[in-house]
Amino acid sequence: MLRRFGLKDRRLKALAEIVHEADLRDGKFTRPEAPGVDFALKGLAATIHDDHELLERGMVVLDGLYATIKSRA
């Protein structure tokens, strides 16, 4: 998606790699955050059954990751 839309934000690239590895676990990206992100999002999905609320809260997690990546720059 990043390439398709011409996005060059390195924080988005890092976030995309984290989400890819958390979701697919194919070893393409060795992001140490991936297991924790996967665990957190699965925990949300197990306790929130309304799709809109789940999406909203999941986005808060991803926004937090983006902000953390920013602070490490």
Image (cartoon, rainbow, N blue to C red):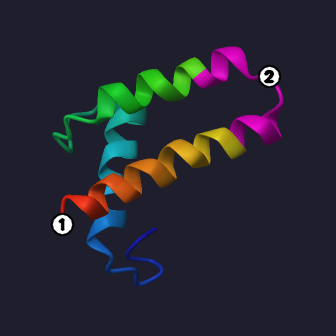
Q: Mark 1 = which residue? A: 73
Q: Secondary structure at mark 1?
A: loop
What is the quadrant of residue 16 in the picture?
Answer: bottom left
The number of callouts visible is 2
Instruction: From the viewer's perspective, tell me whether residue 3 is left or right of residue 50.
Output: left
- Residue 71 x/y as whole percent: 26, 60
Q: Where residue 65 appears, x then y in whole percent?
A: 39, 49
Dot 1, crowdedness within 10 Å: few (<14), some or many (≥20)? few
Vertical arrangement, residue 52 with respect to residue 50, above or below: below
| Drawn side of residue 30 relative to residue 34, left or right | left
**Rendered position, 12 above or below 22:** below
Q: Which residue is at a point 42% across and 28% down the rendered structure image? A: 38
The residue lying toward the viewer, choosing from 35 and 67, is: 67
Residue drawn at x 80%, y 22% as measured from the top left = 49
Residue drawn at (30%, 51%), measured in percent from left and top?
17
Q: In the rendered structure, are the residues bearing label 2 and label 1 in contact, judged by CB atoms less than 8 Å apart?
A: no
User: Which residue extends farthest top?
Assistant: 46
What is the chief secondary structure element of the magenta stretch?
A: helix
> Is 42 in front, or is 26?
42
The amino acid pointed to by label 1 is Ala
Rendered view: 68 above or below 61: below
Query: Which stretch appears magenta?
Result: 44-55
Q: Quadrant of the C terminus?
A: bottom left
Residue with the mark numbered 2: 49
Check residue 64 in the rendering and tell me which mark sits there, or answer none. none
Name the residue furthest bottom.
6
Give the amino acid type for the residue marked by disc 2 in the picture.
His
Say which residue appears at 56% left-offset and 18% top-offset. 43
Q: Earlier in the sequence, mark 2 or mark 1?
A: 2
Label 2 crowd (10 A; few <14 / some 14-19 / many >=20): few
Front in this rendered view, residue 14 or 66: 66
